Amino acid sequence: MRIVKVLVLFMGVLIVVGIGLVAYGLSLDKNADDPKTTPVSPVTPSVPLAGDVVSSNAAPMMPSASLSAFGDIAVDMAPGEKLISYSRQGDDVTLHIESDEGNASRLVIVSIEKKKVLGRILLGTSAQ
C-alpha cells in the first residue's frame, strides 16, 4: 500500500510540473525572432493569373500596409508606353508596362528598399 501512495504522489508531481510547462509555453512570445530559423514569406502571384479579367479603367488597389518614404526611383519608359497596372508584394513593386499598339508588353520588378530595378520580364511573341 505504501508503494501505491508513493506512485500517486509522484504522478501528482508530474501533473503539476506538466501544467506548469504548458503555461510557460503558452506565455512565450510567438512573434519573437528565432535565430535558428530563417523567415519565410508566403509567395502569392503579383500579376493576374490566366482567366482573370483585368480592366485598365479600374482603380488600382491600395496596399494593405503603409510605406515609409523611399524617394525617387527612375523606371525607363519608351515614348508611347503606358503603365497598365501595378502590384506590391513586400518591398517589391511589379509594374505592367505596355506600348500603345499593345504588341509589346513587359513587367518591371522594382525594389523599393534597394531603390533600383531588379529585372524585366518581356511578354509577347518578340520576347522568345
Image (cartoon, grey):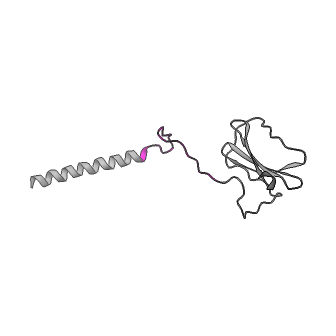
- Among the 4 quarters of the image, the one containing residue 117: top right
63 relative position to 37: left or right: right
In magenta segment, residue 37: yes
Visible residue check, residue 85:
no
44 sits left or right of 24 in the view? right
Residue 19 visible to an observer of this rendering: yes
- Number of marks in the rendered image: 0
Highlighted magenta segment, given as a residue range: 26-44
Q: Against 115, is 65 above or below? A: below
Q: Is residue 4 above or below residue 30?
A: below
Which residue is at 28% across, 49% downward?
16
Give 96 or 19, whichever is nearer the viewer: 96
Residue, x 18% and y 53% (percent of image)? 8
On the image, which quarter does residue 55 sit in?
A: bottom right
Q: Position of residue 48 (x, y in %)?
A: 72, 57
Determine the main secondary structure of the stretch shown in magenta: loop
Outermost front residue: 128
- Residue 3: x, y in percent? 11, 52
Q: Pick whichever, 101 or 41, lies toward us.
A: 101
Answer above or below: position of 46 versus 73.
Answer: below
Using residue 81 as the reference point, say whether residue 92 is left or right of it. left
Q: Position of residue 96 (x, y in %)?
A: 78, 50
Q: Residue at x 34, y 46 (%)?
A: 21
